[in-house]
Image: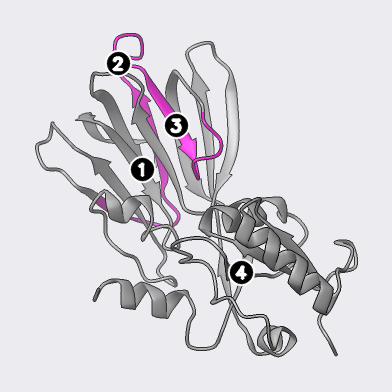
Amino acid sequence: MQPRIRFMASKAPAAQSALARLTGRYGQTDLRRASVVVALGGDGFMLQTLHAQSGRDLPVYGMNCGTIGFLMNAYLDDGLPERLQMAEEALLNPLSMRAQNVRGKITDALAVNEVSLLRQGPQAARLRVSIDRRERMAELVCDGALVATPAGSTAYNYSAHGPILPIGADVLALTAMSAFRPRRWRGALLPKTAEVRFDVLDPEKRPVMVDADSRNSVRDVISVVVRSDSAISYRLLFDPGHGLEERLIREQFV
């Protein structure tokens, strides 16, 4: 049975050209009748597509029309139905974020890769870190800190010198960016079930913002709570032998 494909593309010219070619060749299925979504773009567009499919339980197969494409497959015009039928599936649980700002407003968001706190001004942030409601670090002075999933461990987390996590690992990475106190503290590995809470200790003098996958920004936060949401699963499809597990291993030997 041929897959019923819904193509989605970023606004980049290469992705739009690919969209025209592929829909002309394979057709375009209404999203309500589709059995699979094919995302054309880069990793940023893949994250956008996954968030848009939340609640639909549709697998997403990406083809790289961007730059890095860690979450994407190689782009090819030919043999797409066969590639979809042979594809291997990876299930990802997102992080849920609840942030409160200085005015008391609560913002909830999901992140496939990471939730990151960043200093908002010229001075370093001062954060208190608690795990499962137990204070673990009374004061972390840094440019920022993040909590990353295994899928996101090769993204911002890796650039901040955090560890690469195997895709099936039931752990999260807590990583600091440019830690000043404790000096050179790089972070910790936490159980996937852990609840991580950050409290901003000096929000007026040292304001902090938070991002979920760099798409849900909240400024002037005073607290952020992050946990893995096992009730939500995103379904990614990869060509055989080129799934996330292989990519995570390969990335460590570059």
Label 4 environment density (alpha carbons within 10 Å; few <14, some 14–19, many ≥20): many
Residue 32 on the magenta segment: no
Q: Which residues are magenta?
A: 188-217
Tell me whether circle 1 and circle 3 mark residues in contact (CB < 8 Å). no
Give the mark toward the camera: 4 or 1: 4
Whether pointer 1 and pointer 2 mark residues with C-beta atoms closer than 8 Å, the reply is: no
CA distance for labels 2 and 4: 40 Å
Neighbours of disc 3 within 10 Å: few (<14), some (14-19), many (20+) = many
Residue 210 circle label: 3
Q: Residue 234 appears in which quarter of the rendering? A: bottom right
Horizontal side of 251 relative to 94 (left or right) equals: left
Residue 233 shows up from this direction = no
Q: What distance separates the C-alpha of mark 4 from that of mark 3?
A: 27 Å
- Residue drawn at (11%, 42%), measured in percent from left and top? 184
Q: Amino acid at mark 2?
A: Arg
The tag on residue 244 is none
Mark closer to the chain start, 1 or 2: 1
User: Residue at label 1?
Assistant: 146
- Alpha carbons under labels 1 and 3: distance apart: 9 Å
Q: Taking 237 as reference, is 118 above or below it?
A: above
Does the residue at mark 4 contact the one at mark 3 (Cβ under 8 Å)? no
Q: The residue tagged with tag 3: helix, strand or loop?
A: strand
Residue 163 in percent (x, y) is at 27, 60
